[in-house]
Image (cartoon, rainbow, N blue to C red):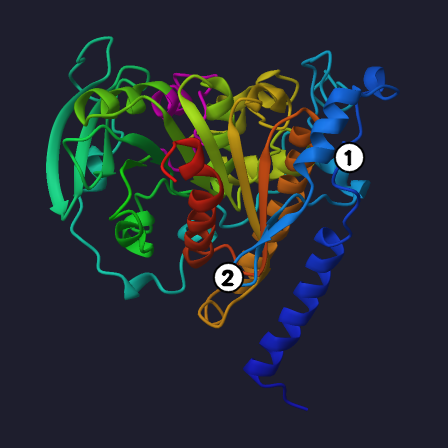
């Protein structure tokens, strides 16, 4: 019997949905913290437990059928997700077995094929949005032949359309000029907060970014906030790499995104200094980490279908898959598998650093919408399943440490910009706008 392509696709969807369901819908009490490290497994602070219970009460319905709530996941997956390495945090949750010999994972972890390509964060409706001509990739994060000094500075501004401009910023940390898209607040003569809004695995330089794939210009048209998106940093994990002499360049993106870029926007575009940061897919976890490193700067942080637990077995597989898209490697970025940098760049390792930050974590079950069904939704479903597992772990770890987390989850969405757009809207309404006193 011949099976039609449509029937084969439907069958594959059912199988993938069943697998995803097994992975992510066996919820446990969301107030229960993940497994602790051996030295802390017998105790848990009552204050933290009470904070977790308070944070998980109730849920808020969203008009599209998704919901904001605090959801947990089965602890069966924790050994694959919990932070793992030699760094020790006395009160850390789920810090693993402290394997310091560097052999527990090995150097040849299978990569997620194609994770560094546009497919990982592409939108099935990509060309339904008008695309303005942007600068060539050559001037996006390339090393500069001129050293403009030790302080970040604005070098050039170019109009794109409406309130959207391109800005070139000198990054001392990266020793390069980075091009960014800046969507200016509607009232340019009135102080505005800044939202650092990052793109996916290609850093937005491949043509798919918030401008080309979403309605973000229309959405922010009446909101007093400067929205800035770097174009560059593809396959970098947006962290400060351990090896600054890597073939992939210096890659000190955490410093650029957490300190240099917000400072320039504040000084040059009438900023308030009370900002937020958000990322999707590859940049979701880094958004939370950068906020934790700069609590005085960021009042809110959001991960849209990100992977906010990066030093466990599963997180390292994802990270290595992404980093294979660069000219460097995971060793360049984080050091050997026993390096403390793996854990210290993992937002789930010390989530207590986010106690003064309002956090949003969004995912979907990966089932494609009608809009996404014609695309490569099976890959998107897989990525969403991984995002669910790591996001659930981070949420439980963070809530157990007294962090306020809004957990957004929806049935439909297959790791595309259509989903990321919905998550951005939900994050703005529930978390970012209130934190910036804009609601």
For residue 79, the mark is 1
**Above or below: residue 62 compared with residue 307:** below
Instruction: Judge left or right: residue 257 versus residue 373.
Output: left
Magenta-tinted stretch: 233-258
- The image shows residue 163 at horizontal and vertical percentages of 16, 44
Q: Secondary structure at mark 1?
A: helix
Screen quadrant of the C terminus: top left
Report which residue position mark 2 lands on. Answer: 63
Q: Horizontal placement of 76 versus 20: left or right?
A: right
Location of residue 407 (image quadrant): top right
Measured as percent of width and height from the top left, residue 324 is found at: 49, 38
> Going from the N terminus, do you reach mark 1 or mark 2 first?
2
Looking at the image, which residue sits at the far top? 150
**Residue at the location (53% across, 39% down)?**
360
**Which image quarter: residue 79?**
top right
Where, quadrant-wise, is the N terminus in this rendering? Answer: bottom right
Q: Nearer the viewer, mark 1 or mark 2?
A: 2
């Amino acid at each position: 019997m011949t099976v039609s392509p449509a029937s084969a696709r439907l069958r594959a969807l059912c199988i993938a949905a069943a697998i995803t369901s097994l992975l992510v819908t066996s919820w446990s009490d969301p107030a229960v913290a993940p497994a602790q490290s051996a030295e802390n497994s017998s105790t848990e602070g009552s204050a933290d437990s009470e904070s977790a219970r308070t944070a998980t009460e109730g849920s808020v319905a969203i008009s599209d059928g998704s919901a904001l709530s605090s959801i947990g996941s089965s602890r069966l997956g924790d050994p694959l997700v919990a932070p793992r390495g030699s760094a020790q945090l006395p009160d850390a949750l789920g810090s693993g077995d402290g394997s310091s010999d560097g052999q527990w994972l090995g150097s040849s972890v299978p990569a997620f094929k194609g994770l560094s390509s546009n497919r990982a964060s592409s939108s099935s409706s990509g060309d339904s949005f008008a695309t303005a001509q942007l600068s060539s990739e050559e001037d996006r994060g390339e090393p500069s032949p001129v050293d403009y000094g030790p302080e970040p500075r604005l070098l050039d501004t170019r109009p794109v359309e409406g309130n959207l401009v391109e800005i070139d910023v000198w990054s001392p940390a990266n020793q390069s000029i980075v091009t960014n898209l800046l969507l200016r607040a509607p009232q340019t003569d009135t102080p505005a907060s800044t939202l650092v809004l990052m793109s996916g695995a290609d850093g937005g330089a491949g043509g798919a970014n918030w401008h080309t794939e979403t309605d973000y210009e229309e959405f922010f048209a009446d909101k007093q906030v400067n929205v800035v998106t770097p174009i560059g940093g593809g396959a970098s994990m947006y962290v400060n790499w351990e090896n600054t002499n890597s073939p992939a360049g210096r890659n000190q993106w955490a410093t650029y995104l957490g300190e240099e870029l917000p400072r320039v926007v504040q000084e040059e575009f009438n900023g308030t200094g009370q900002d937020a940061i958000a990322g999707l897919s590859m940049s979701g976890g880094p958004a939370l980490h950068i906020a934790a490193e700069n609590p005085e700067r960021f009042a809110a942080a959001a991960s849209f279908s990100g992977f906010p637990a990066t030093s466990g077995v599963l997180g390292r597989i994802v990270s290595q898959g992404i980093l294979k898209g660069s000219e460097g490697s995971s060793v360049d970025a984080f050091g050997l598998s026993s390096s403390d940098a793996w854990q210290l760049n993992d937002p789930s390792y010390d989530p207590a650093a986010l106690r003064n930050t309002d956090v949003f974590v969004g995912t979907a079950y990966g089932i494609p919408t009608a809009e996404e069904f014609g695309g490569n939704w099976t890959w998107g479903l897989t990525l969403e399943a991984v995002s669910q597992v790591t996001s659930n772990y981070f949420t439980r770890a963070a809530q157990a440490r007294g962090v306020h987390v809004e957990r957004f989850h929806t049935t439909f969405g297959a790791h595309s910009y259509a989903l990321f757009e919905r998550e951005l809207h939900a994050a703005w309404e529930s978390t970012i706008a209130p934190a910036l006193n804009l609601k």
